[in-house]
Image (cartoon, rainbow, N blue to C red):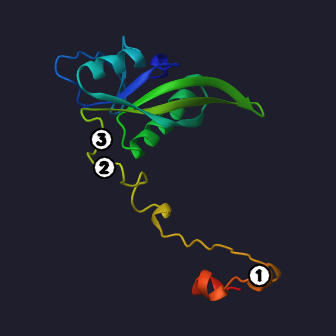
Amino acid sequence: MSDRVRAGTILIQDGTPTPEGMLVTTQHYSAGWSSIAKFTSAQLSRAFENAGWTFFYMAGELRTSGFGLTEKSRTDRAVTHLIDAVKRQRCNCLEIDEIRLRSFLGLPYTSVVAHARHIQRSRTFHGSSGMSVGTPLRPSGSPMDQPVLVQSTFSLGRESLEAWENEGGSRAASIPASVSSFL
């Protein structure tokens, strides 16, 4: 698998629609994903734009590491983590930006940096499931779906408040009851 993965490699989810007449050569990479051959990201962007499609570049970079006994297994693990992250963003492509071989305390690992990409006909991002942009990017049932209670600590010193009131400020007129109950 990792023989075909290097900086600049673009992986595409199998079954991703492309414009009619556009021939994109791919090579199988892993379960459900293939690498695009003979195209750079700039060439793909131009080709999709000329066909009226969009090749989105998602701004946030994805970073991951893979551990294993061989360089190939480390790289494959890291790329598998990236593919999972791209799926959570509901994108259908992945562009590898950087691959580095590293070690920590003598344990070798591979660090991979990539960006999610997405191919679709519309200029408004809908994700591979056709859902609008406002849908959550996390899978349902995760701990992140639980409501979060945010407590704000509003601190206004009594001396400051009394000085302000002495200068003509009115506590009842400008401070909501919910805030003044904390004072």
User: In the visual, does 79 lie left or right of 168?
Assistant: left
Say if 168 sits above or below 31 in the image.
Answer: below
Report which residue position mark 1 lands on: 167
Q: Position of residue 127 (x, y in %)?
A: 32, 42
Helix, strand or loop at mark 3: loop
The answer to the question of whether label 2 and label 1 lie on touching residues, with beta carbons closer than 8 A, is no
Label 1: element kind: loop
Q: Which residue is mark 3?
A: 128
Q: Is residue 73 left or right of residue 12?
A: right
Q: Secondary structure at mark 2?
A: loop
Q: Image height check: is 94 above or below 125? A: above
In the rendered image, the residue lying farthest to the right is 159
- Relative to 131, 110 lies left or right: right
Q: The disc labelled 3 sits on which kind of residue?
A: Ser
Q: Mark 3 and mark 2 in contact (Cβ < 8 Å)?
A: no
Quarter of the picture containing the N terminus is: top left
User: Marks 2 and 1, how far apart in space?
Assistant: 52 Å
Residue 178 vs 54, above or below: the answer is below
**Place of residue 47 in the rendered image (x, y in percent of width and height, measured from the top left):** 29, 17
Q: Which label belongs to residue 132?
A: 2
Question: Quadrant of the rendered structure where residue 95 is?
Answer: top left
Which is nearer the N-term, disc 3 or disc 1?
3
Label 3: how many residues lie within 10 Å, few (<14), some (14-19) or many (20+)? some
Residue 80 spot, x, y in % from top left:
47, 35
Q: Which residue is more in the foreground, 182 or 93?
A: 182
Q: CA distance from mark 3 to mark 1?
A: 60 Å
For the residue pair 160 and 126, the one nearer the viewer reads as: 160
- Distance between the Cα atoms at labels 2 and 3? 10 Å
Query: Looking at the picture, how far across and down is residue 30, in whole percent?
Result: 38, 29
Pick the quarter of the image with the C terminus.
Answer: bottom right
